[in-house]
Amino acid sequence: MAERILTPTAESPPQTRLAADELAAGSPALIQVSDLSLFYGLNQALRNISMDIEEKVVTAFIGPSGCGKSTLLRCFNRMNDLIDGVRIHGAVRIAGQEINSPEVDVIELRKRVGMVFQKSNPFPKSIYDNVAYGLRLQGASRKSELENAIEQSLRRAALWEEVKDRLHTSGLGLSGGQQQRLCIARAIAIKPDIILMDEPASALDPLATARIEELILELKKEFTIVIVTHNMQQAARISDFTAFFYLGQLVEFGATSKIFTNPTNKQTEDYVTGRFG
Amino acid sequence: MQTYFEKELSDLKEKLLTMASHAETAVKNAIEALINRDYDLACRVREQDAILDRFEVEVDEAAIHLLAKAPLASDLRLITVAMKISQNLERVGDEASKISNRARDLAEETPLKLALEIPKMATLALQMLKGALDAFVNHDPDAARTLIPRDKEVDALNKQVYRELASHMVQNPDTVTRCLHLMVVAKSLERIADHATNIAEEVVYLYEAEDIRHTGKGITKS
C-alpha cells in the first residue's frame, strides 16, 4: 500500500502515502489524495499530500493556523475553485473518480460532498426552507415528500424536538448551537456521502459543542466525516483517525488513539503536548 | 440518553467490576484450597492470576484512551481512580497466588493445628475488599470510610499469628517450613486488607474529592 512520493524540500523528511494502517488492507479508501500540491499564487499551501480517507469514519485534521488543513478540506469539494490564482497539482479521487477532471460537474460534486463551516450560515429563511432548499434544487416539490425529508434531516441533526413547533420561523432566530445543527440538517438533507466540517464548534459554548460532538458520532454511522479542529481534545473525543499538518505537509496520520498517546513524529508530539514552536 | 463518552465511562466501570469479581474469587479459592488442603484448586488460582493481569492492562488502556479526551471533575476522578483500583486488584490477585502456592505445598505435608486465626483474617480481609467495592458501586463514601479502621484488626491478627508461629518454630524446629508457609499466608491476607483499604480511600476521593490517604482520617469526616 505504501508508495513513496516526492520529497518537498531537501530539509524535510521524506513523505510516504500515509494511510490508517488498520483499514489499509480493506477496500479502496473513499477519498484518495495523491501527491497533492496547491498554490495560492506563488505561495505553496499544500505540499505533496498523499493520504487515504476511509468511509464512514471521522477523520480529524489538526495543526497550527496556516498549516493547510482547511485548504485540503476545501479541495474535497473544490471550494478552492472560487479563489483566484489557485493552482492544484496531483489528484483527489472520491469513490475512484478524479474530482478535478474537466468532465466533473462541480454542483454534483458538492451534492455528494457537503460542508459545514465555522460560522453557522443559515439562509435568511425559515427553518423549514433552510432544509428544503437543497431538496427543492434537486427537484423535490411534493409537500409530503419534502415534509418527511425535512423531519428526518432535523431529527438526524438532533434539532427536531427543539424546532418542530416553529418550523416556519426564521433560522436566524435560533441559538448559535441550534443554527449550526440547522446547517448540518441542511447538509444531510440532500444525502451526501461526505460531510466536511471546518471548525464546526469553535464558536459554540461547551454544552452546544458537546451536542455537536454527539451528533458527529451519530452521523458517522451513515456519512464519512472529515473535520478540521483546533481543539485537540475534541479530535480525541470524536475522531477515529487524525492527521497532523504543518507548513503545508502531512506530518503524521494514524489512529486517533495512537496520535494522542504515542505519536511517531516528534513534531506531532510537540504539537499535541502544546510545546510547539 | 447516555452520551458516547458516558457509555465509555460505564464500560470502564463494568470492566473494573468484572476484574473485582475475579479478584474476590481468587482470594476465596486460595483460602478454600488452604483450609481444605485442595492441591488442584490451589493450582487453578495460580493459573487464573493471568486473567487479573490482563484486566489491569485493559483497564489502563481504556483509562488512557479516556484521559486523552480531557475529562473533568468527577469524570476525571473516576478514570484516575479506576487505574488505581485496578492496580490494587491486580496485587490482590498476586497475594491470592502466593497463598495458593503455600496452600499447595502445605497440602502435601502433615497438617499443623496452628494459626487458627487465619480463617478469621481471611473473612475480615474479604469483607473489607467486598465492602470497598460495594462502596464504589453504591456511591457510598461513608461506607468506605467505616472500612478503613478495620485494617488494624487484620494487622493485629497478623502479629498474633506471627508470634504464635515464631515461638512454635523455636520449640519444634521440624515444623519451620510449614510455619513459614503459614506466616506468608497471614502476611498475604494482611496485604489484601491493605489493598482493600487503598480502594476504600480511592472511593472516598472519587465521591468526595477528598484525599484521605496518609492523613489518619478514616471514619470521621474532616
Image (spheres, coloured by chain):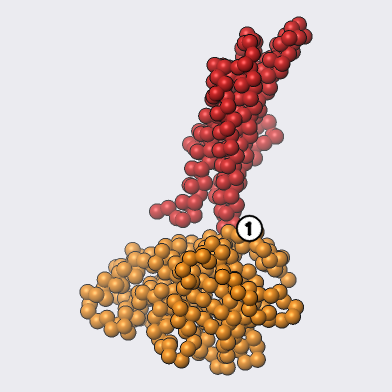
- B18 in relation to A150, above or below: above
The quarter of the picture where the C terminus of chain B appears is: top right
Name the residue: 51% across, 89% down: A81
The quadrant holding residue A194 is bottom left
Name the residue: 63% across, 8% down: B113
Q: How many marks?
A: 1
Relative horizontal placement of residue A10, taking residue B62 as reference (left or right): right
Regarding residue A192, the answer to whether it shows in the image is yes
Name the residue: 51% across, 71% down: A53
Relative horizontal placement of residue B9, taking residue A150 as reference (left or right): right
A115 vs A8, nearest the viewer: A8
Chain identity of mark 1: A
Q: Position of residue A70 (x, y in %)?
A: 56, 78
Relative horizontal placement of residue B51, taking residue A164 as reference (left or right): right
Q: Residue furthest top?
A: B171
Q: Position of residue A270 (x, y in %)?
A: 70, 65
Relative horizontal placement of residue B97, taking residue A197 as reference (left or right): right
Q: How busy is the neighbourhood of tag 1: few (under 14 within 10 Å), some, or many (20 plus)?
A: some
Q: Secondary structure at mark 1?
A: helix
B75 vs A236, nearest the viewer: A236
Question: What kind of residue is marked 1?
Answer: Thr
Regarding residue A179, the answer to whether it shows in the image is no
Q: Position of residue B106 (x, y in %)?
A: 63, 17
Chain identifier, colour orange: A
Chain identifier, colour red: B
Q: Can you identify the residue that label 1 sits on?
A: A261
Q: Position of residue B84 (x, y in %)?
A: 62, 41
